[in-house]
């Protein structure tokens, strides 16, 4: 190695043997590629120096290969002197830790009612509640999946306090405590508000429809059953008439023709078989919206009796279903989930429920949650406002909703309560479009004078109330111009009659007032424009991120409990993120 010297070495007492060897190899390779080796001397000398350097590198690499690198390989069968603490399974700011600490501070006395004194002690209710809330926050809705996670996931083990909860225990707990689990939603809202969440200055209300845990094939309607019953009775009548014709034909035949070996009897049997077969084809073609059963083609005349018995059995089933609907006072029902009602989906009408939420516009905390059978949102507005006030204990600032909640009765009640609201109006939008199409004033262009119960036209002339006989279910009020409209400069843009007439509902003034409030909001706060980002994000998180595609339970009470558990889990997840960002703990916010 003449001409190369020794590579630069670090002090032996500071650098391990393996590290020193690596430093020497890197230094030697650098010197091999430097300009001195590549340029000095003849080509023969340069080749010799390069070969000797490569040999030295090879010896160093062989030396590295002989160095034993110490690695720690744990034996999984090795027992621990001290068992691990469950508290070490998750970090201090983990979501499940926040959920467990919040649940411990809730009043769970309602879950302990009715516990038997004999037998093995039951699991503490806070263990079940913590596991269910954390599972729902991750989009795990199945009890069997919760069971598997409690055996393999450290976070679930922490929530279950090391207990191996079976899916049966989890399912029975959810079924036995539907109302108690629903009531925890309001308590968690109160906890979140202590942490500074859930401002009621702007509350946004909206609803979404979700598929029930039932098939469309199991859904029946009274109108459909009545049509099916009538069709079944007509089929039975045809069968009886055809049997009577066959009997009459047999009676008209001479007695000697009834010999079993006669050819005419065989021809008659063929004719009967053909008639029955033709009748079956006609019945199958005429039957609509019924569950068809595959039936073998009749081989003899006795098949006619079998078909008649089947139709009689089907008639009894339909009559039983109609009787059940009459007793319940409903117009439709589902055999799998009797509480489910037809809702509007992209795929068409399907059995389901309507889920309603009210969220805080500031931080999107869910302040109220409800599940109803009603496919529309109109009658849910006032109830959601009352639930928000009950859960928060404060009066709402501004209520924001879409046109699905539009109703003159709703607007009148909000005005009576003194509640400020910004709600879109579909009828006002239609009136504006009609004005653009025709170029004439619509009812929306008239101002209402509540003190005199009169309308004022754009020209300033008054329309007074006139008596009218309403022939519709919704009472209407007629307003007629007090003086003739002849000579008015805006008459061509208003009416062709001598006097302008307005036939309106009694609640139309409140619709006009709400339309003006909406126009003011467009120019100032723009609460209505921000509505989608406030509440639709919550539904998007439920259905997209948490994969909430269908109700797990059956029945209105079970679905309401399931939805409020989901909303509670989302609120607790939001609380955990806020506490982590502020570097706070639950004890610092709620106290020890």
Image (cartoon, rainbow, N blue to C red):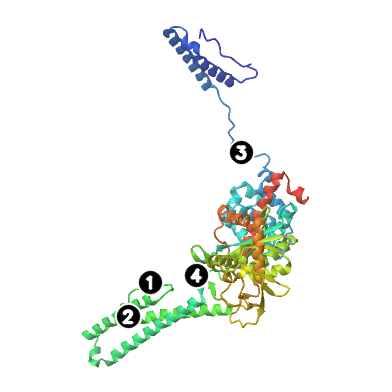
Label 1, secondary structure: give it: loop
Residue found at x 63% / y 69%: 407
> Tag 2 or tag 4, which sits nearer the N-term?
4
Q: Is residue 420 above or below residue 254?
A: above
Label 3, label 4: how far apart the Cα atoms are = 57 Å
Q: Is residue 379 above or below residue 563?
A: below
> Tag 4 or tag 3, which sits nearer the N-term?
3
Q: Residues within 10 Å of mark 2 (few under 14, many from 20)?
A: many
Given contact means CB atoms under 8 Å apart, are the residues at marks 2 and 1 in contact?
no
Q: Is residue 271 above or below residue 462?
A: below
Tag shown at residue 78: 3
Q: Residues within 10 Å of mark 3 (few under 14, many from 20)?
A: few
Could you say which is closer to the camera, residue 334 or residue 461?
461
Residue to which mark 4 is pinned: 218
> Tag 1 or tag 4, which sits nearer the N-term?
4
> Tag 1 or tag 2, which sits nearer the N-term?
2
User: Residue 124, image x and y in percent?
Assistant: 70, 57
Q: Is residue 285 left or right of residue 28?
A: left
Label 2, secondary structure: give it: helix
Label 2, label 1: how far apart the Cα atoms are = 16 Å
């Amino acid at each position: 190695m003449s001409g190369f010297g020794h590579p630069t070495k670090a002090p032996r007492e500071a650098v391990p043997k393996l590290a020193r060897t690596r430093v020497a190899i890197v230094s030697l390779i650098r010197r091999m590629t430097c300009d001195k080796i590549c340029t000095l001397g003849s080509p023969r000398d340069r080749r010799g120096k390069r070969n000797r350097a490569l040999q030295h590198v090879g010896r160093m690499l062989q030396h590295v290969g002989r160095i034993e690198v110490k690695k720690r390989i744990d034996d999984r069968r090795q027992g621990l002197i001290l068992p691990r603490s469950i508290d070490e399974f998750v970090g201090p700011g983990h979501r499940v830790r926040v959920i467990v600490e919040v649940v411990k501070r809730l009043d769970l006395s309602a879950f302990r009612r009715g516990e038997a004194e004999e037998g093995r002690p039951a699991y503490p209710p806070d263990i079940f509640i913590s596991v269910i809330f954390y599972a729902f926050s991750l989009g795990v809705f199945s009890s069997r999946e919760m069971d598997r996670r409690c055996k393999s996931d450290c976070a679930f083990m922490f929530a279950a306090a090391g207990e191996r909860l079976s899916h049966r225990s989890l399912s029975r707990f959810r079924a036995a405590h539907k109302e108690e689990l629903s009531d925890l939603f309001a308590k968690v809202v109160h906890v979140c508000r202590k942490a500074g969440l859930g401002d009621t200055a702007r509350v946004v209300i909206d609803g979404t429809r979700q598929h029930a845990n039932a098939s469309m094939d199991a859904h029946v309607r009274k109108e459909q059953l009545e049509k099916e019953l009538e069709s079944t009775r007509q089929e039975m009548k045809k069968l009886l008439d055809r049997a009577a014709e066959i009997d009459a034909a047999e009676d008209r035949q001479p007695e000697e023709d009834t010999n079993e070996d006669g050819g005419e009897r065989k021809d008659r049997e063929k004719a009967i078989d053909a008639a029955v077969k033709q009748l079956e084809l006609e019945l199958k073609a005429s039957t609509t919206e019924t569950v068809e059963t595959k039936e073998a083609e009749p081989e003899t005349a006795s098949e006619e009796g079998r078909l008649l018995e089947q139709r009689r059995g089907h008639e009894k089933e339909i009559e039983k279903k109609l009787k059940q609907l009459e007793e319940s006072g409903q117009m439709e029902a589902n055999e799998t989930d009797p509480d489910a009602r037809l809702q509007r989906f992209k795929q068409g009408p399907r059995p389901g429920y309507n889920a309603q939420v009210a969220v805080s516009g500031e931080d999107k905390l869910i302040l109220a949650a409800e599940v109803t059978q009603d496919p529309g949102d109109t009658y849910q507005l006032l109830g959601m406002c009352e639930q928000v006030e009950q859960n928060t204990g404060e009066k709402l600032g501004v209520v924001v909703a879409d046109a699905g909640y539009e109703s003159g009765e709703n607007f009148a009640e909000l005005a009576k309560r003194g509640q400020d609201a910004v709600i879109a109006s579909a009828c006002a939008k239609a009136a504006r479009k009609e004005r653009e199409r025709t170029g004439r004033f619509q009812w929306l262009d008239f101002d209402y004078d509540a003190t005199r119960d009169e309308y004022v036209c754009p020209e300033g002339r008054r329309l007074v109330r006139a008596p009218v006989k309403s022939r519709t279910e919704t009472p209407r009020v007629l307003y007629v111009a007090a003086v003739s409209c002849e000579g008015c400069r805006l008459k061509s843009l208003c009416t062709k009659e001598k006097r302008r007439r307005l036939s309106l509902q009694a609640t139309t003034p409140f619709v006009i007032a709400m339309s003006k409030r909406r126009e003011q909001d467009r120019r100032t706060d723009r609460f209505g424009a921000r509505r989608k980002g406030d509440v639709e994000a919550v539904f998007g998180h439920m259905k997209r991120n948490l994969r909430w595609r269908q109700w797990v339970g059956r029945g209105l009470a079970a679905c309401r409990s399931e939805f409020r558990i989901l909303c509670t889990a989302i609120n607790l997840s939001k609380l955990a993120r806020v506490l982590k960002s502020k570097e706070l703990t639950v004890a610092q916010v709620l106290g020890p």
